[in-house]
Image (cartoon, rainbow, N blue to C red):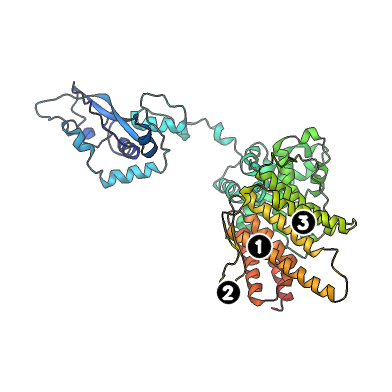
Amino acid sequence: MVAIAAQREFTKDEAYRRSLIREHTDAPEAVSPFGKDLAQEENHSGEEYSTIIAEPCSTDQDEQASHSHISVSTVTVTWKATANAPRPAALLDRETRAKEPLSARTVTAIESAHQQTSIQDSYQASTVPQTTSQALHHGLVTGIDYPGISQFPRGSVSSWPFNTPQEAYLLRHFIDNVSCFFDFCDSRRHFAFIVPQRARSNRTLATAMLALSARHLGRTTQFDPFVADHYHQECLQTLIPILGESTAILDEAILAALVVLRLLEEMDVPLVGSDLQRHLIGTQAIIQAQKVDIGARSSSFWQAACWAAFRQELYVCLTGQRAIQLNIEQIPIIQSTDTMDDWDWASCAVIHCRDVLQFAFGDGCKSLVTHHKLWKDNWNWQLQKSSSFDPFYLNESVSTEHCHMFPDIRLQASCHVMGYQYNILAHMLLVIYDESIPKAGPAHKIAVRRVDEEAKKDVQTMCGISLSNTHTPSAMIMASMAISLCGDRFTDSREQKELDKILLQTEQLHGWPTSAAQQQLRQTWGWA
């Protein structure tokens, strides 16, 4: 037996690339990971030799910190020398051949496989793999066959209710691009992770997701808009009869389906000029959900769905300038600032915005005392919020193509972005609905001018945050709402064009209907 026991260290990527050669050449099962020569000469059988596979080796602590190493161990293969058959070249000079460059064909094959295979931190041929990815790599090195996905039990795939490539595509789009409209204040991202799993056993929720995903694609791409209509109707056919049952709203999947459909219908109506409430299916059902016994509302999934419905209600109230019908008191929120995380702080900003909306559009007394308390709450949020809300980049005067208008305020996470957006929106409403403004006289004119400047500054800040944090699409929707409320206060034509551009981008990029707001403001600005 010819034993090759030389030990050599090389980088993990090199060992991994070479160990894949056997998989992408015509080599039989027992083949050296260092090239095709051994495979081509495999017909010489009889004498044993050892080939090399990569295993992790120990290095000192500093080396491990700077560079991953893999050791070389041996595996025995049979080879018989004959009179007319020389020893395989791989046995003559293994160290030299190990350093030769790989052929272009082999490199291409390896890199193609490399893109589809997880690189494990260690490669141990003697260890039985515990996961699918480990099994696949283990098979590449040792030649042991492990089942591919085509060999998995059919039930593991068919339990998903998405039966066509189009439905699979729509599900992927929902997870990657639509769930963010619900999850920006949710650390567990229920609509990205939990809702799709619940849809596996609830076709009503599944069709609601498909309908919303298709509507978003139809409004932002050339995707067929009738696809969304098809799934919307299919969803309503099963949802409407269910809503007639007294216990229907106890089903978390049904509540989630209502929230998803509510967002779809928000996309189908203008930002201004319509009564959204009469268009939205299930609004009363969501209101009734707030009256359900607290024991049925204890799950995080239920709370996430109710929070999403509550934020949708704020949007409806702002566009319709009316009081809120939903309440949020039953949903637990941490009250101690010592234990609040960033998502709790963002949720506090949402609740504060609710309080300001009730003050501005509700039927209650708009006293100076209430206004002062809300003003103090707004300022306290700014002072007490977590330091992680601090921008990692700030430039308060940014030159656009035409004018100096929007600040550049870059924030780490969506909860930071939306916490600021809700707080600033509440501040803008408190400025507008300031009961201390004189009703007449010279002081009235001065106060109105001050209000206009403060409101414009808030609009500019919200627009700057939305443009600086494109990873949070909802921020641009909030900015568009601020523009629709206070855009008429801008008199500079350059500023007007920048605001109009944001409204246009919101509709083109995120599918949010702003055309009515664009038309109304253009008339106010004297463009039409």
Instruction: Give percent across and percent down for residue 98.
Output: 23, 37
Residue located at (37% from left, 39% from top)? 66
Residue 498 in sight here = yes
SS label for mark 2: loop
Residue placed under numbered mark 3 in the picture: 316
Foreground disc of the pair 3, 2:
2
Q: CA distance from mark 1 to mark 2?
A: 17 Å
How many marks can you see? Answer: 3
Residue placed under numbered mark 1 in the picture: 461
The amino acid marked with disc number 1 is: Thr
Q: CA distance from mark 3 to mark 2?
A: 33 Å
Quarter of the figure that contains the C terminus: bottom right
The amino acid marked with disc number 3 is: Val
Q: Earlier in the sequence, mark 1 or mark 2?
A: 2
Instruction: Give percent across and percent down for residue 469.
Output: 59, 56
SS label for mark 1: helix
Quarter of the figure that contains the N terminus: top left
Residue placed under numbered mark 2 in the picture: 402
